[in-house]
Amino acid sequence: MAFTVSHIFLLVIFLFPFQYCSCYLTSLKKGSSLSVEKHEKDVIVSSNGIFSAGFYQIGENAFSFAIWFTEMQNHSYDPANIVWMANREQPVNGKLSKLFLLNTGNILLIDTDQHNIWSSNTASDAPLELYLKEDGNLVLRELQGTTILWQSYDFPTNTLLPNQPLTRYTNLVSSRSQSNHSSGFYKLFFDDNNVIRLDYNGPDVSSTYWPPPYLLSWQAGRFNYNSSRIALLDSFGKFVSSDNYSFSTYDYSMVMQRRLTMDSDGNIRVYSRKNLSEIWYISYQVIIDTCIIHGICGENSTCSYDSKKGKKCSCLPGYKVTNDSDWSYGCKPMFDFTCNRSESTFLKLQGYELFGYDNNFVQNSTYKNCENLCLQDCYCKGFQYKFVEDKGIFNCFTKLQLLNGRHSPSFPGVTYLRLPKGNHFSKEETMSVKDQFCSVQLHKEFPRKPISHMLKFFQWLVITVGGLECVCFLLVFVFLFANKKSSVDKHNYHHALGFRRYSYSELKVATKNFSNEIGRGGGGVVYRGTLPDQRHVAVKRLYEAQQGEGEFLAEVNIIGRLNHMNLIEMWGYCVEGKHRILVYEYMENGSLAENLSSKTNTLDWSKRYDIALGIARVLAYLHEECLEWILHCDIKPQNILLDSNFQPKLADFGLSKLQNRNNLNNNSEFSMIRGTRGYMAPEWILNLPITSKVDVYSYGIVVLEMITGKSSTMMNIEGDDGEVAYNGRLITWVREKKRSACWVEEIIDPSMVNNCDLSKMEILARVALDCVEEDRDIRPTMSQVVEMLQSHDLST
Ligand SMILES: *[C@@H]1O[C@H](CO)[C@@H](O)[C@H](O)[C@H]1NC(C)=O
Ligand SMILES: *[C@@H]1O[C@H](CO)[C@@H](O)[C@H](O)[C@H]1NC(C)=O
Ligand SMILES: *[C@@H]1O[C@H](CO)[C@@H](O)[C@H](O)[C@H]1NC(C)=O
Ligand SMILES: *[C@@H]1O[C@H](CO)[C@@H](O)[C@H](O)[C@H]1NC(C)=O
Ligand SMILES: *[C@@H]1O[C@H](CO)[C@@H](O)[C@H](O)[C@H]1NC(C)=O
Ligand SMILES: *[C@@H]1O[C@H](CO)[C@@H](O)[C@H](O)[C@H]1NC(C)=O
Ligand SMILES: *[C@@H]1O[C@H](CO)[C@@H](O)[C@H](O)[C@H]1NC(C)=O
Ligand SMILES: *[C@@H]1O[C@H](CO)[C@@H](O)[C@H](O)[C@H]1NC(C)=O
Ligand SMILES: CC(=O)N[C@H]1CO[C@H](CO)[C@@H](O)[C@@H]1O
């Protein structure tokens, strides 16, 4: 395979091969010691050479007794290789510090001043040795017999190695940061209910954030009756916990070097690599929507997604950041808090949610009551006033502290922030946005399809940079997704429970031998069907298998994890032989295209406005909130389905492409033009880089069609512009009309004329025209569209 050959070649260029030095120790016997001055040689190495134990330099003149994945000769310091530490809180001096295996059988770590920093608290008269096993477990064992007095596996720090169990007696505690190995804020452990969970234990507050605190353990798919409390990552990459939580890494089934780490940003990740000379890559990440991690942005701030940088922390209006280089300190107020109610005012923040720390909760509250409730309380910092859709009422939560803030244009929640009157803090002025994680992933990440991307990268490196050391490349090619519904109230864990693999024969029965065809396109034919549990489904049978099973499964897994109320839900899939089938929820009201062309006039102006808003929300989610950058590339009325309440659901990822977010200028992935005539942005034809703005353009066309009731593709047929495959006729027509005063009345769908909120239609039309600008840089982003539509939507 070309990969291996070129790879070895490149490795030779860039990396010094690992050289096993026979001068290392194989074990430490009673009465002997390791000394910090000789830390380069006084190293115990496992017999397979993979692990080393000894003094590891973690700072200037600061050493810890540690176990690490053996590094190359001439290593640069890489904290990612450390798997265990005896003295993480208290590093020892680089002079005179020693580790002894005493004749009493105790292991003792002594600092320069003879101070005892750490000990194993063991005792034995028998001959002993301290020995590093091939799996990275450092054991103190009797030379004769099998008795083990002490082992590092029983005292993990922030890392579990394959087959090292996490038990009721052990836990993983994150490091304070990537360079500071002291205990940090995050802990993985079994709680008293036998559930494995993650806690944030910050300087002032602590809370559980995984499994989601608003779910009962069974709702989160966990058992609490199995009291064995044991969890383990096996050699093949499968993690299983006794509470029935489990996952498999993306490289599952291969035996390779792996480590599961409680990272300092509160996430659990599994890192893998083939061997010592390769680079670690993330092969699994437990928390997909990283903004749910508590304390991540500190107090008085919010976490949101940034399309380019991933996670982003921002201070709430009126607050400023305490320490730019460490957001866990949060933001502090720039005003004096007043208890005097007549001096307080509230700033409305749409799309903000602050989780927890409510001192009052009132169901079915009026806005005035909620505001009063907050004003009565000197310590109330603001409140959340939230509409509960299924009950048609508003709930009121007053906040003692402003913690766990999240912001997303697609959130239904509204938070009112208490500020002193006469303040000049407006949302726009003070949302001074800082990127927290520009330097985030010091850990090396790796493309999911390492072959072509790695090679491309290396070739580029060789050509342009020559001898650059490939120490740090951040190909942010994350293969995990936001899987959380935007509304916290809807505990819809359908995906976790219902998403499954179907057999071909099951689907054959469900669709009556694929007899009831309801649609075509996007790479397959769609049939209607009914599952044995009576659920109606749309079954999409893809044309000839172009993908291998692995690739198909990877993509299905990704699509199956996407979760947004305006996205069609995928319930399962089938892959058998050459069959590739996707199973979706069935939408009663058909597609937007059918509804627009139907004579019965099913869509009034308010439904159309809601549909436009819903589609904007889901596109904002796909473009900006999913960790992987997703373009739909085929937005058209045929792909927008309507549920029984005429809520839109975006369908058909047939042409979507999961893209490398950082690779905006490389549209080689898009060598073929994708999309549908009439909805395609000019970039496709002009051969410009393809960005999320292509979806914005198509969205604009769809909205124009909704407003006018005219089809852009029909107009296209009337006058074809030859080479230009996209058509500006509908746009031109609307733009021309816009010159006159009553333009909105002139353009709207005649069926709406008698009953229409013209001001809303005008907003919609203006937004749509912005979206179809030829210059993609002028077009708004989808989240800007959401904000524009939302700010005029009086119903929220
Ligand atoms: C590490 O793995 C790569 C790819 O499988 C292989 O080419 C290389 O020889 C290996 N290196 C060592 C030191 O085993
Ligand atoms: C590491 O973090 C701990 C705990 O926050 C702190 O006390 C210590 O000073 C930090 N060490 C360094 C070198 O920054
Ligand atoms: C409890 O969990 C352990 C480890 O996963 C498993 O071996 C055992 O069968 C489980 N017991 C029950 C009653 O489910
Ligand atoms: C444990 O969870 C898996 C899904 O992750 C499920 O298939 C399995 O049935 C569950 N085990 C039990 C005993 O319910
Ligand atoms: C901010 O945090 C960093 C890292 O913890 C620390 O080194 C620095 O001194 C802090 N700065 C201030 C102003 O507190
Ligand atoms: C957050 O703001 C409140 C006032 O709203 C203040 O009392 C608190 O100290 C702030 N927290 C931090 C970490 O600065
Ligand atoms: C509250 O503020 C108002 C107006 O600023 C003032 O007239 C009133 O005396 C204040 N009340 C208290 C209790 O300080
Ligand atoms: C909410 O409160 C209003 C007036 O207080 C009442 O009329 C209405 O029935 C309540 N709704 C619910 C669902 O309790
Ligand atoms: C032990 C070892 O190989 N040291 C080398 C590390 O790299 C520098 C230059 O980059 C050499 O000078 C050292 O000899």
Image (cartoon, helix red, strand yellow):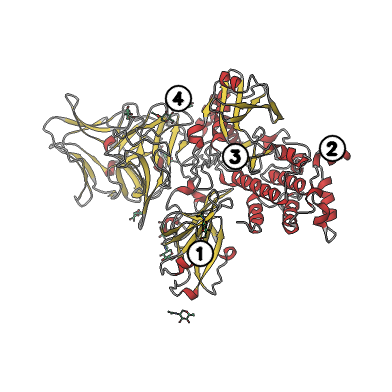
Badge 1 amino acid: Leu
Q: Which numbered disc, 4 or 2, marks the residue that appears first in the sequence?
A: 4
Residue 788 rendering spot, x and y as whole percentages: 66, 56
Q: Are marks 3 and 2 in contact (CB under 8 Å)?
A: no
Depth-wise, is mark 1 or mark 2 nearer the camera? 1
Q: CA distance from mark 4 to mark 3?
A: 25 Å
State the residue position of label 3.
Answer: 660
- Judged from the image, the secondary structure of the residue bearing numbered disc 4 is loop
Q: Earlier in the sequence, mark 1 or mark 2?
A: 1
Q: Secondary structure at mark 3?
A: loop
Kindly identify which residue carries mark 1. 417
Q: At x 70% / y 48%, what residue is drawn?
A: 608
Q: Is residue 192 above or below residue 577?
A: below
Residue sticking out furthest to the right? 719
Q: Residue at x 69, y 43 (%)?
A: 695
Q: Which residue is mark 4?
A: 253
Which numbered disc, 1 or 4, marks the residue closer to the eye? 1
